[in-house]
Image (tube, rainbow, N blue to C red):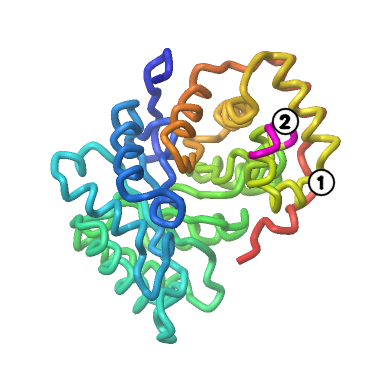
Amino acid sequence: PTPTHPMHYTRLGRTALQVSRLCLGTMNFGPNTTEADSFAIMDAAVDAGINFFDTANVYGYDKGRGLTEEIIGRWLAQGGRRHKIVLATKVFSQMSTEPNNRGLSAYHIRKACEDSLRRMQTDHIDLYQMHHVDRDAPWEEIYQAMEQLVREGKITYLGSSNFAGWHIAQANEIARHRNYLGLVSEQSIYSLRNRHIELEVIPAAQAYGMAVLPWSPLGGGMLSGIFSQHDGVRRQRAPLLASAERLRPQIERYEALCRDIGHDYSDVALAWVLQRPGITSPIIGPRTMEQLQGNLRALDIALSQETLDALDAIWPGTGGPAPEAYAW
């Protein structure tokens, strides 16, 4: 099923670019989802109005190959699709044992961009995101490389991922001095159970007119009904269940609330992120067509203020960053 209401679109931060309110994350393509199923999910996403796809060179990493980007490339090569999507990928991760095939040196940025373009069989990347801060790379070096790629038409916009609020401010102030557009988006972990970016990252992004693209909006699966599923599913998710035990009281209250308001657990979690101030497009990562269809249902849910207050009581904003927030 497709959502009752048509897909909504919004600007990517302060840019004029229009992106769908849901962004299709592709991390599962290759490792967990077959190429045929990945193709079907991408087709269905476009049919549902999703025009924003997110990937990374390191997704599906195998002996120096980014298998996920390769799958996207073969899907794009079928023709008539590239102009329909805003394509985002990332640079930072180590892609081989070579010492310069990682990080944000100008050398690696250029090489990684060329490699991503080749894998995805396209001539440009719409949003090129730094997957993590590189504390060894001066901003002058990073921007020299990125500006050159923009001049060559290989990237259009620059974004960040897993940045702290002060990194966002630093990067954009230096960009101003260079008369460069700078960062237009930040991709951060964000869900009911992980709200640390409300402290500084979201305010910094709003101050600089940046889109916020939450990843893991279902709390790593902990907001998907983990304690309410039948035994077969529970056995498959044993490692997640073990790590969820410390949050059992909150999760059980959350699952009871979802049942009371008559919505699926995952749908409520995603609808909450969609309604948060400053959020542009949550990144969904469906492994199956059924999960994609479930994600689309969240577009039809408008949580009442009473429900939002109840969710805040269960999952209050944190007093500091979660321990795993910037782990790499």
Q: Quadrant of the C terminus?
A: bottom right
Residue 47, position as x, y percentages in the image: 29, 27
Question: Residue visible at 32% across and 57% down?
Answer: 69
Does 229 appear in magenta?
Answer: yes
Residue 245 - label = 1
Question: Residue visible at 37% across and 50% down?
Answer: 34
Along the viewing direction, whichever of 58 and 37 lies nearer the viewer? 37
Does 192 appear in magenta?
Answer: no
Disc on the earlier residue, 2 or 1: 2
Alpha-carbon neighbours of circle 1 within 10 Å: few (<14), some, or many (≥20)? few
Residue 169, position as x, y percentages in the image: 56, 55
Q: Is residue 188 above or below residue 252?
A: below
The residue at which mark 2 appears reads as 228
Q: Amino acid at mark 2?
A: Ser
Query: Is residue 211 in view?
Result: no
Element marked by disc 1:
helix
* Extent of the magenta region: 227-232
Left or right, residue 145 beside residue 224: left
